Image (tube, rainbow, N blue to C red):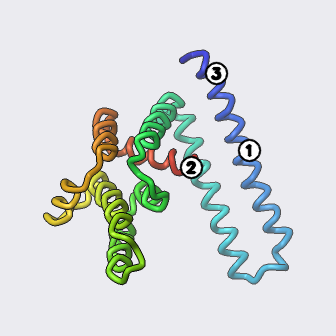
Amino acid sequence: MSSRGLSETNKLKHNLEEQLDRLVAQLADLEECRNELDEDEYEETKGETVEQLREFNATLSKIMSGNMTLVDELGNMQLAIQAAISNAFKTPEVIRMFAKKQPGQLRQKLSELERDAKIGKLSQDVLNQQKIEILFALKKLGDELNPSETHFLQLHSTATMKEFEQISSDSGTSEKVLEAAASQLKAM
C-alpha cells in the first residue's frame, strides 16, 4: 500500500490544485462576462461558485485536520467498485439521490415510476428493477418502509442486491456506503 500511496497522494494533490484553479478561473470569467448576464443570472452563478469554493475549503480542512485520509477514500472507492461490479444499482439517478441522502426525492421518483407503469409508459420489468433500487436505497438511508414495500423488496430483491447489502454490512456504517455511492457517482 505504501508504494501506491505516494502515487495516489500525488494524484490527489494534482486534482485538488486543478479544482482550485477551475473555481478561481470560473469566478474570473464570471466577472469578465458580468455585463453580458442579467443580475439574477450573475448572482445565481456567483453564488453557486462561492458555494463550491466553501465545499472545497471544507474538504481541504478535513484532509488537513486528519478527519479524512487517503486510505479511507481508497476504501470507499473499493466499496463503490464492488457495488458497481455487483450491479446493485443500475440507475444513475437513484445512485445520485442515494449519495445525496434524498429520501424525499427517492419517494417522489418511486411515485413517478408507478404512475408511468399504470399509464403504460414503463414496462413492469423496468418498474420492478428501479423500485427495488429505490426501496433498497430508502432502507439504507434509514427511511421506514411500509409492510407492502418490505414485502415487495423481499420478493423481488436480486442476488446482486443481496450481495451489495452483504458487502455494505461487512464494510461498516451506512455513512461509508453513502460515501461509496457518492464516489461511484463521481466516477460516472
Question: Mark 3 or mark 2, which is nearer the start of the sequence?
Answer: 3
| Residue drawn 35% across the image and 59% down it | 129
The nearer-to-camera label among 2 and 3 is 2
Of 39 and 162, nearer the camera is 162
- For badge 3, the amino acid type reads Leu
Which numbered marker is on residue 6?
A: 3
Q: Mark 2 falls on what kind of element? A: helix
10 Å crowding of disc 1: few (<14), some (14-19), many (20+): few
Q: Does label 2 or label 1 sit earlier along the sequence? A: 1
Q: Which residue is mark 2?
A: 186
Q: CA distance from mark 3 to mark 1?
A: 18 Å
Camera-side residue of 76 and 13: 76
Residue 142 in picture, x, y percent from top left: 26, 55
User: Counting residues from the N terminus, which is met first, the one under dot 3 or under dot 1?
Assistant: 3
Q: Residue at x 60, y 48 (%)?
A: 57
Given the image, on which type of amino acid does mark 2 rest?
Lys
Does residue 119 appear to the left or right of 34 in the view shown?
A: left
- Residue 45 falls in which quadrant of the image? bottom right
Residue designated by label 1: 18
In this rendering, would 88 be left or right of 5?
left
Give the distance between the C-alpha atoms of the residues marked 2 and 1, in whole angstroms. Answer: 16 Å
Residue at disc 1, secondary structure: helix
Given contact means CB atoms under 8 Å apart, are the residues at marks 2 and 3 in contact? no
Residue 178 vertical placement versus 114 (above, below): above
Residue 4 lies in what quarter of the image?
top right
